[in-house]
């Protein structure tokens, strides 16, 4: 078979036979994606600059107020402010690169656009090798990488080498698929997913020292307002810290893909006044009181082996695979933030956890309506 003769196309404008209108459509059709690309590339820098320029738009006033969206541009406390400085430097460098590259692109699109007087039959001059251009696109990028690497190393060092003064709160955070176990060793508290910490005042800073571990696979801890990301790796103890200076509830996420419900292991950091924090500690340290009115529910909980995964202090339930439920009602959410801690969601969770959180480790326990009602009544007494 004869191969097609590509050379026949050489220098032939495909719009040649199309008439003037179609030719213009082709030209505009070429320009629109180019303009679109420039506009698209401007969106995120513009968005980031706008959100930086409008600080405080989402600031919380009380410890119950949840920050509606997570932002690296509103750092709360020392380590986050250090990270923020490096972020701004990196963004400014990127903005400079954007202006230079976008400007050159725009210049090329306009200056070398197709014109009616163009000679379409010959190739433009072919240039091979230019020392000046090659130096221009290798030397500045290398310098930029060196500057950013040094700035990052300084930030990491500053955060890691901080010596704590005062009376730091210590919390051990253990990542599980798909929830967070929280231990406060000084207070003998074990809870899950909702991290209560006292606010730091300028006069009395109170750093929160975090020890990060994992029970299964690698997870990542990130609450953007409070610090950068840190890993939770099985068999390793990573140190991290936060020092929030504004009341509020701050949301965070797991940052390492750890399985089906990776997106639904939410972190809530509740920054409260020192008094509120002390009240919370007192409540969590208190052994649970047993309400005889919910004895049936407690029995259902135990015979359905809920206790082989969950701990309720003072009972035979002492499992470690699921969240500690001793003070279950002190938490505002279920399933690491997938639903509010309210009756209807709790019933749905007990009927089949796989509905609210498909792929979570808690199986459908095949409870009937009567058992579900009694267990809900029991759990609601766990203050
Ligand atoms: Cu844990 Cu992703």
Image: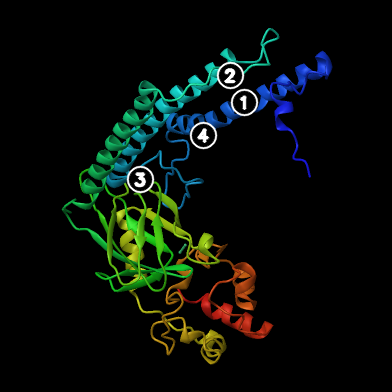
**Closer-to-camera residue (102/126):** 126
Gap between marks 1 and 2 measured at Cα: 8 Å
| Colour convention | rainbow
**Closer-to-camera residue (345/278):** 345
User: What quarter of the picture does the C terminus occupy?
Assistant: bottom left
Name the mark nearer the viewer: 2 or 4.
2
Which residue is depicted at the point 53% across and 76% down?
361
Label 3 sits on residue: 246
Label 2 sits on residue: 109
Which residue is depicted at the point 71% across and 9% down?
116
Label 1 sits on residue: 34
Q: Of label 3 and label 1, which has the lower sequence position? A: 1
> Circle 1: is it few (<14), some (14-19), or many (20+) Cα within 10 Å?
some
Q: Of label 3 and label 2, which has the lower sequence position? A: 2
Q: Can residue 7 be seen in this view?
A: yes
| Contact, mark 1 vs mark 2 (Cβ under 8 Å) | yes
Q: Of label 1 and label 2, which has the lower sequence position? A: 1
Q: Of label 4 and label 3, which has the lower sequence position? A: 4
x, y (%) of residue 227?
A: 34, 49
Q: Does 103 sit above or below residue 339?
A: above
Label 4 sits on residue: 44
| Contact, mark 3 vs mark 1 (Cβ under 8 Å) | no
Name the mark nearer the viewer: 3 or 1.
1
x, y (%) of residue 133?
A: 39, 23
Q: Quadrant of residue 136?
A: top left
Q: Is residue 177 left or right of residue 345?
A: left
């Amino acid at each position: 078979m004869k191969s097609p003769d590509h050379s026949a196309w050489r220098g032939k404008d495909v719009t040649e036979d199309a008439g003037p209108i179609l030719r213009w459509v082709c030209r505009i059709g070429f320009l629109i994606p180019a303009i679109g690309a420039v506009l698209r590339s401007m969106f995120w820098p513009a968005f980031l600059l706008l959100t930086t320029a409008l600080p405080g738009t989402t600031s919380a006033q009380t410890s119950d107020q949840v920050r509606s969206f997570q932002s690296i541009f509103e750092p709360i406390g020392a380590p986050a402010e250090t990270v923020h400085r490096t972020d701004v430097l990196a963004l400014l460098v990127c903005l400079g690169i954007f202006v230079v590259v976008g400007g050159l692109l725009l210049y090329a699109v306009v200056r070398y656009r197709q014109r009616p007087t163009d000679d379409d039959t010959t190739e433009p001059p072919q240039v091979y090798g230019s020392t000046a251009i090659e130096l221009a696109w290798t030397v500045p990028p290398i310098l930029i990488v060196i500057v950013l690497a040094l700035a990052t190393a300084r930030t990491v060092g500053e955060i890691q080498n901080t010596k704590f003064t005062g009376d730091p709160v210590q919390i051990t955070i253990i990542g599980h698929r798909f929830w967070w176990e929280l231990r406060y060793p000084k207070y003998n508290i074990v809870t899950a997913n909702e991290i209560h910490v006292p606010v730091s005042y300028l006069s009395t800073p109170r750093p929160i020292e975090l020890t990060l571990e994992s029970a299964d696979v690698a997870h990542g801890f990130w609450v953007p307002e409070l610090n950068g990301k840190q890993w939770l790796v099985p068999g390793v103890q990573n140190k991290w810290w936060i020092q929030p200076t504004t009341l509020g509830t701050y949301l965070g996420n797991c940052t390492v893909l750890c399985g089906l419900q990776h997106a639904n292991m939410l972190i809530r950091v509740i920054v409260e006044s020192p008094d509120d924090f002390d009240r919370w500690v007192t409540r969590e340290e208190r052994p649970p009181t047993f309400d005889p009115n919910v004895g049936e529910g407690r029995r259902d909980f135990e015979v359905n082996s809920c206790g082989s995964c969950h701990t309720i202090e003072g009972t035979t339930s002492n499992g470690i695979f699921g969240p500690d439920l001793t003070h279950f009602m002190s938490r505002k959410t279920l399933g690491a933030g997938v639903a509010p801690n309210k009756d209807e969601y709790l019933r749905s969770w007990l009927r089949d956890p796989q509905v609210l959180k498909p792929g979570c480790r808690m199986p459908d326990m095949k409870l009937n309506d009567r058992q579900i009602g009694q267990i809900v009544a029991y759990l609601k007494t766990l203050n």
